Image (cartoon, rainbow, N blue to C red):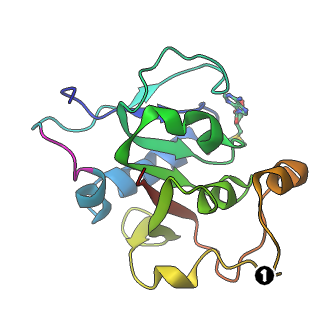
Amino acid sequence: MRPSTETLWANQDQHQGDRLRLFAAVSGLNGVDEIVSRNKTYRQSHLVEFIADDYRGEVGLAEQDFDLLVSLYAGFVSEHCTRYLRVGGHLLVNASHGDAAMASIDRRYRLAAVIKSGGPNGYRVDVRDLDAYLIPNQPQALTADRLHQLGRGIGYTKSPFAYLFERIS
Ligand SMILES: C[S@@+](CC[C@H](N)C(=O)[O-])C[C@H]1O[C@@H](n2cnc3c(N)ncnc32)[C@H](O)[C@@H]1O
């Protein structure tokens, strides 16, 4: 394992400060640190690296070399970038652009936690009652083609800020 934990972040914009607070909540000491760091075999803290590139192309990263992949309001990042995530690594994703739905039908993932607004850092992590999430408001057959057609997320009975999936295969 490399002596650092790296995060592929698709882009930067005016919400970067807010996203960094979210990242602090997720990778900080609020419970998920234990989840994200489960595979960590080194003492150093996480390293966050920003990559300004099109995530659909070759971005020069090694496959299955990352512990955390972040996909917030940026399209189907998981479709193109899961290959960089090692098995046992995590995908932080929200529903807005459909990528949470995409991850929910991707057999390489299982839901590990939900991220809710609130708490000392503005976000908190909940690992309870996960079966109660990702239930569509309107029953429908979800496929990758359908999600591409929609080009956005679907409505769920519960709407946490984001989801944390573990790559399991
Ligand atoms: C609504 S912003 C969200 C930005 C950030 N993820 C956040 O949560 O604040 C959508 C961003 O996705 C980026 N984006 C869309 N498709 C992309 C791609 N194929 N590769 C890299 N960035 C992409 C856009 O450049 C834009 O900055």
Mark 1 lies on residue: 137
Residue drawn at x 83%, y 75% as measured from the top left: 140
Q: Which percent across, then down, holds residue 28?
A: 29, 53
Residue drawn at x 52%, y 82% as measured from the top left: 131
Residue 89 sits above or below residue 3 on the image = below
Look at the image and tell me whether residue 65 can be seen: yes
Q: Amino acid at mark 1?
A: Asn
User: Left or right: where does residue 130 sit relative to residue 40?
Assistant: right
User: Left or right: where does residue 120 sit relative to residue 130?
Assistant: left
Q: Which residues are magenta?
A: 37-41
Look at the image and tell me whether residue 15 can be seen: no
> Which one is nearer the viewer's eye here, 63 or 14?
63
Q: Which percent across, then down, holds residue 164?
A: 47, 60
Q: Which percent across, then down, holds residue 50?
A: 48, 26
Q: Quadrant of residue 3?
A: top left
* SS under mark 1: loop
The image quadrant where one finds the N terminus is top left
Residue drawn at x 36%, y 47% as measured from the top left: 89
> Which one is nearer the viewer's eye here, 78 or 163?
78
Residue 4 sits above or below residue 79 on the image = above
